Image (tube, rainbow, N blue to C red):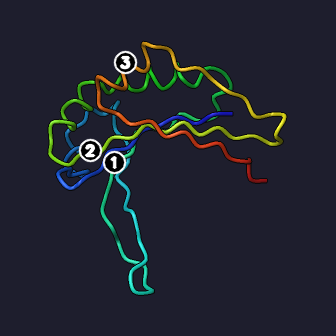
Amino acid sequence: MFTVYFWIDGQGFDADRFQSGLAQHLMGTVEARKRMRNGAVEPYGRYWKSEVRASISEAPEKELAALLSRYKAEILRARAGDGVRIVAEIVAEYDSIEDARGFHLTSATVQLLAELGVALDIDIVRRLR
């Protein structure tokens, strides 16, 4: 199974303002990162996260392209700010090594990522029971 989403953060990015400027059908969530500093956990900045498309059994690359296309104007608007980072995530979960499956990024999907300035992170993890 696959999960697909993307997030936006950065010094020049205001996650709350971005969220409040979205149409209702594009709302995501604003979340806070934390870090350890001098042995204590402290807040480390806020980021915006798109809807999470989970339990995808086939073609996560198509889901990714559809998700990014849906948010294209908003991504380009966010990208216009200084120090903004946009990362798409594909998480592949497997129960056993034999269940791990791959996928193929089409040239159209790679071109869309490049056009939007979106980095891609792929995580392959054993499903927790």
| 95 shown above or below 31 | above
Q: Is mark 1 on a helix, strand or loop?
A: strand
Residue 87 disc label:
none
SS for dot 3: helix
| Label number found at residue 111 | 3
Q: Circle 2 sits on which residue? A: 19
- The N terminus - image quarter: top right
- In the foreground, 12 or 102: 102
Nearer the camera: disc 1 or disc 3:
3
Residue ID for mark 1: 48
Amino acid type of the residue that numbered disc 1 sits on in the rendered structure:
Trp
Quadrant in the picture for residue 77: top left
Q: In this view, does 13 lie above or below 61?
A: below
Question: How far apart, in angstroms, are the residues tagged by discs 2 and 3?
Answer: 26 Å
Q: Which of marks 1 and 2 is in front?
A: 1
Residue 110, above or below 121: above
Q: Is residue 30 left or right of residue 17?
A: right
Q: Determine the CA span between mark 1 and mark 3.
A: 23 Å
User: Which class describes the residues within 10 Å of circle 1: few (<14), some (14-19), or many (20+)?
Assistant: many
Quarter residue 81 falls in: top left
Q: Which of marks 1 and 2 is nearer the N terminus?
A: 2
Residue type at mark 2: give it: Gln
- Residue 121: horizontal and vertical position, in percent? 49, 40
Mark 2 residue element? helix
- Mark 2 or 3: in front is 3
Whichever of labels 1 and 3 marks the residue nearer the N terminus, that label is 1
- Total of numbered circles in the picture? 3
Earlier sequence position, callout 2 versus callout 3: 2
Whether pointer 1 and pointer 2 mark residues with C-beta atoms closer than 8 Å, the reply is yes
